[in-house]
Amino acid sequence: MADQDREVLVGGVNRVVREGGVVRRPAGVWSGTVQRLLARLAEAGFDGAPKPLGLTADGAEELVAYLPGEVGHAPAAPQVRDDAALVAVARLLRRLHDATAGFVHQPDDVWLLPPREPAEVVCHGDAAPYNTVFRDGLPVAFIDFDAAHPGPRVWDAAYTAYRFVPLHAPDAPELGGLVLPAPEVRRRLDLFADAYGLSARERAALPPVAAERLRALVAFMREQAAAGHPAFTQHLAEGHDRRYLTDAAWIEHTLSVPPNTDDPRPLH
């Protein structure tokens, strides 16, 4: 295969390689379940996820179709932070969740992350800019479904809002100096909730659930590092867990308490 038909794709945990129109990823015990999920999404007409191509003969790699576009690795990039992208990603997440409604759960399903009740949908689990394909500045697809697991809509929506609104404390270095004042964070959080179509109860739950989701992520990272996973060990060494805990505390302090008691809106 010509060199131009093969490239190593940027990833935070796994080494992922594209060969022509096929992406090769390290397989986990959950990969068979993820392949069934991706097949269900394709059957439902959802075009915002890679099509499954099975596992290699030795079961060491998972194969999916390549989705052309740009991945949003720069958190402060304009195509990640503008309102149109925020609306588009909320609608894309809603379409994904709706498309999982017909997924048939089996007793031998394996998920990387533990299922959470109520299991309303199958969550992507990591629908963030670095797992989002952009075309013409707008999100069109999600990739890397390793963290998929059954759970409530708001559990997934809260994490995507954390990454795209974003719900970072003002000192977050990954924003490249971009700091959003709290009123702007609330406005964008409302915009996200409107675009997804969250109920009033779900909207009110977004901030506290986002904080809970970040603490669950920290627990998972520390568990994986303790088991010897090199990528998560590096993440802890770089202070990712401290960043998430700082953000969780800021979310609870700033967004979970209404700043204006005369404003009846759930998130205000």
Image (spheres, grey):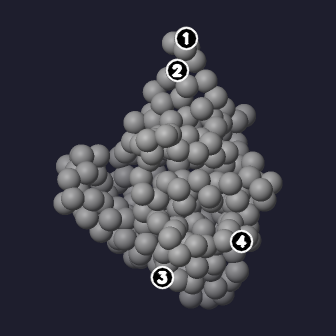
Residue 213 horizontal side relative to residue 19, left or right: left
* Within-10-Å neighbours for mark 3: few <14, some 14–19, many 20+: some
Residue at the spot x=41%, y=52% of the render? 28
Label 1 SS: loop
Q: Find residue 2 and name its label.
A: 1
Residue 176: x and y in percent read: 42, 41
> What amino acid type is highlighted by mark number 1?
Ala
Label 3 SS: loop
Residue at the spot x=54%, y=29% of the render? 18
First along the sequence among labels 2 and 3: 2
Query: Could you tell me how far apart the alpha carbons at marks 4 and 2 are, in whole angstroms?
Result: 35 Å
In front: label 1 or label 4: 1
Q: Find residue 101 and name its label.
A: 4
Q: Find residue 67 and name its label.
A: none
> What amino acid type is highlighted by mark number 3?
Val
First along the sequence among labels 3 and 4: 4
Label 2 SS: strand
> What amino acid type is highlighted by mark number 4?
Ala
The residue beneath circle 3 is: 257
Query: Could you tell me how far apart the alpha carbons at marks 2 and 3 are, in whole angstroms?
Result: 50 Å
Residue 170: x and y in percent read: 40, 57
